[in-house]
Image: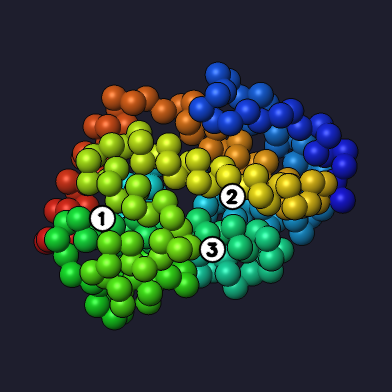
Amino acid sequence: MYYDLIASLPHLPHFEQAEWLPITPLRLNRRLQRLRPAHAGQLARARSLVMWRREHLMSGRDADLINGYAALMDTPLEQPLRDYVMFRMDQQTILAALRWRQAGLPAPEEGVRWGSGARVHQIRTHWDDPDFRLAYVYPWIASARNLLENGDAIGLERLLMDVTWARLDRHADRHMFRFEAVFAYVFKWDILRAWLAADAEQATVRFRELIDKVTHVEHS
């Protein structure tokens, strides 16, 4: 139980409602020193892989991400944290598939390293279905597809942040004073920091450049 740690953390408003970070990186890291060593190690490993990064949102063929996921899954993780990591990697894999298909490419062949997680086979098998027959699990796919097709970088990021935030809220609500609530807070803090740092004009430029780069790579 982490009563004192949770009680020491200020409330995080929803990322769209916040004007500043309620706690600095330095102070957050100091609070996290209260974690048990095993939990601190798990959080550090998971955070290095799935903390919010725009480059992972936009670029699909990140071998380091794929290798990192495989390595992380081979280490001890509390089941709720493992479930969250799997959710985030599903998110990345679905976005990679949407990009491939938007570029007019066929389903990746067996052996091509393009995604990770339990949904890779499902996506490849149902490539021609608009939502890869995953809408019952991830109802946000249709919205993400439309935003991607329209080049709406900020809208896409807002959608995925909101979906992820809601997921983290459920983790926190299940066990309010356990490790699950701590890692939920940290990953929400990462989302909030990324959102506050966003610049709409620069993000749109980066989005177009990255889409052009990915499309060029896939056709080369």
**Looking at numbered disc 1 in the image, what kind of residue is underneath it?**
Arg
Disc 2 target residue: 167
**Looking at numbered disc 3 in the image, what kind of residue is underneath it?**
Met
Q: CA distance from mark 1 to mark 3?
A: 20 Å
Q: Quadrant of residue 38?
A: bottom right
Q: x and y percent of residue 32 in the render?
A: 75, 41
Name the disc covering residue 86, or none.
Answer: 3
Q: Name the secondary structure under disc 3.
A: helix
Is residue 5 at least partly visible in the picture? yes
Q: Earlier in the sequence, mark 1 or mark 2?
A: 1
Q: x and y percent of residue 4 in the render?
A: 88, 38
Q: CA distance from mark 2 to mark 3?
A: 12 Å
- Seen as rendered, the residue at the extreme front is 136
Is residue 24 at least partly visible in the picture? no
* Label 3 Cα crowd, 10 Å radius (few <14 / some 14-19 / many 20+): some
13 or 64: nearer the viewer:
13
Of discs 2 and 3, which sits in the foreground? 2
* Label 2 Cα crowd, 10 Å radius (few <14 / some 14-19 / many 20+): some
Does residue 114 appear left or right of residue 82 in this picture? Answer: left
For residue 197, above or below residue 64: above
Q: Residue at x 23, y 69 (%)?
A: 128
For residue 183, above or below residue 217: above
Does residue 35 appear left or right of residue 47 in this picture? Answer: right
157 or 129: nearer the viewer:
129
- Seen as rendered, the residue at the extreme left is 220
Q: Quadrant of residue 42?
A: bottom right
Q: Quadrant of residue 189?
A: top right
Q: Residue at x 14, y 53 (%)?
A: 216
Q: CA distance from mark 1 to mark 2?
A: 24 Å
Disc 1 target residue: 99
50 or 71: nearer the viewer:
50
